[in-house]
Image: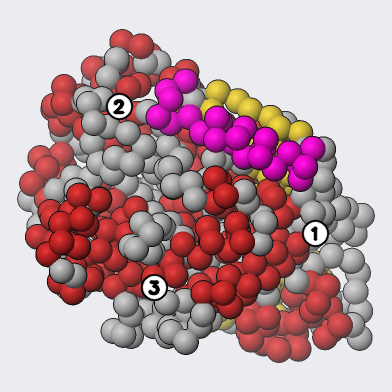
Amino acid sequence: MCGICGIVSKSLSKEKITSLLSKMGRVQRHRGPDDKKEIVFPLSDGNLGFGFVRLSILDLDTGMQPIVCPEDGSAIICNGQIYNYPELKPEVVEETFTSKGDIEVALHLFRRKGLDFLQHLNGMYAGAIYSPKDERLILFRDRFGIKPLYYTQVAETFLFASEIKPLLFAIEAITGVPAELNTDGLETYFTYRYLPGEKTLFKGIYRLAPGSFLEYNLSDGRYSVSRYWQYRLDTVNYDLSIDDAAEQYIDLLSDAVRIRLRADVEVGALLSGGIDSSAVASMATEYHPDIKLFTISFKEKKYNELPQVKEFLKANSGRFRSAEHYTRLCSRETLDSLPEIIRSLEEPISLGTILPTDQICKMAGEHLKVVLTGEGADEIFAGYRKFLVESAASQYHNFSPLQQKKLAIEYPELGQYLYVRHNDPVKRYIQSELLFNPDELSALLGKDIGEVIFPEDARPLFSGGEHPLNAAIAMESRARLPDYVILRLDKLSMRHSLETRTPFLDFRLAEFAATLPPNFKSNLEHGKEKYICSLALNQYGILDAATSVRKKQPFTIPLAEWLSEPDQLPEFLQEILFGDIIKRHGILNPLMIKQDLKSISTAGIGPNTLVSAADRVFSIIIFSLWYEEFFATSIA
């Protein structure tokens, strides 16, 4: 785990690039507090520089980067881990190695296979390769976008980094002008609570898309972005039996956990009351019986999963008898850390899960450098309630009146969803979760808003043959997973110099999940999301019976309770709610937050509530704090 950055310039000197890289590295030093290094390569016309800050986890003695091949001068920097490097190394064993870790294996694979090397990697990674023989710079990112990578081009200088802040620093240092707000993204943010796709809210700064590579021609400065992998869900194996599926699931998940335990430092696990993190922790004890486990609790009973965690550990006391369990309370006082959290996220994400995520990563980071998590299972195995609703809607007209009545009782939101349900899977995907409708957006932003179009570059590749459930999974996995779920996990874990590893996003397991019959994932008969997961984990003794059938509870906060007493909030939040910050920014209508603040109610609100007045207020709070952090200094 680390932070990377790079500069390609025809005008900047070697000394200037080295200085900039060093300062860019300091800006993201939390990603790699153990060591740092910069290298500048002379080009036929200009210079290319690589910068690296290191969090030492694997190959502690020789794993420093950038790594340069002595034979041809090719070089690599990479943020993340390639878990299957021991299996790949025999393919390049004849090459000259200067390290014993994973990243140099990737460099030699590239030298032998070209861009096809990406098809062989299993891990989380975002990196850059300099290929002097054909004057190319290659940026690449893992299949699901677990590790971030941003890039921009200013004043004939190409820049990239693991985070946005180093780019903001470099832009201003090179041009003398700070980065600008991408106002075109405001409608999207206030519709979805995050910004899906390749654009950010900083004008001209882009994310490299998941499963993609960028080829930059060092001779003429042109570049192009291509996909090397897309998550396809249009081929289903309906001949697969549930027993065979359960066996394959366990085999794949077990191996995904096993290879993610590869490290030269201690590895722990984050543990909630759900089946995903419980399964990962349970499997990890086979290799590390004394594993450290970390759980967040709440005073508010509806949100507190600690009792379920304790029940799970007690029911599986034999497996966890040597484990150490750490807990921490997430309370209203946690809101004090919002400015620092937003500074670390770099992009406005107005979902309450950012607070407990930060708290649990802070706690884990006080004890070790690496943890396993259960992230990704809900996206690829249909773990959210909305997937069950989608399954019910897609089959509704095939059911008898009695069955339809039962469905309506089980899913009260189904009737409204059937009424508005769109034929287009892209439009259908977000219908139940719109934060502000077009009229409200118009009032908030002070301009006429038509239909908010979901960004084209955040859409999966559809063949048209996908089952409606799989179409929803494809959308979730291409948009919300990389641009919210994983982004917030990466940024907030790295804020505390902690590496988080996600076994459920092993591409082998994900591709297997894509071929499963839909009812193996979202099963209406049993009223179960992630049906195959529950069945297999209990059948093979990974989870006890009670834990295996536990329903999904979103990892979020009692936002309505906390915001319904504004006089108890931190002073900086009261200034946003009642002061002139929003008016001073001149972007949002301050009346909107006052209207929604009056509408906040705790009645009928719980962890499964998708949209409430509190969520709308929170989105404005997050944006205002974000704007204050990144743009207030340039406000006249």
Report the side of 7 relative to 198 (left or right). right
Q: Amino acid at mark 2?
A: Ala
Between the C-alphas of marks 3 and 2, the distance is 35 Å
Q: Which residues are magenta?
A: 299-321
Report the side of 51 relative to 538 (left or right). right
Between the C-alphas of marks 1 and 3, the distance is 33 Å
**Residue 214 seen in the figure:** no
Q: Which residue is tagged 1?
A: 262
Q: Residue at x 48, y 46 (%)?
A: 550
The reply to whether the magenta stretch includes residue 317 is yes
The reply to whether the magenta stretch includes residue 498 is no
Q: Position of residue 543 (x, y in %)?
A: 63, 51
Query: Which of the two discs, 1 and 3, sits closer to the camera?
Result: 3
Q: Position of residue 398 (x, y in %)?
A: 18, 74
| Residue placed most toward the observer, 282 or 127 | 282
Q: Amino acid at mark 3?
A: Pro
Q: Secondary structure at mark 3?
A: helix
| Residue placed most toward the observer, 544 or 469 | 544
Q: Secondary structure at mark 1?
A: loop
Label disc, if present, on residue 5 of the rendered structure: none
User: Sequence order check: which comes first, mark 3 or mark 2?
Assistant: 3
Q: How is the image coloured?
A: secondary structure
Between the C-alphas of marks 1 and 2, the distance is 41 Å
Quadrant in the rendering for residue 512: bottom right
* Crowding at mark 3 (Cα within 10 Å: few <14, some 14-19, many 20+): many
Q: Secondary structure at mark 2?
A: helix
* Crowding at mark 2 (Cα within 10 Å: few <14, some 14-19, many 20+): many
Q: Position of residue 384 (x, y in %)?
A: 38, 54
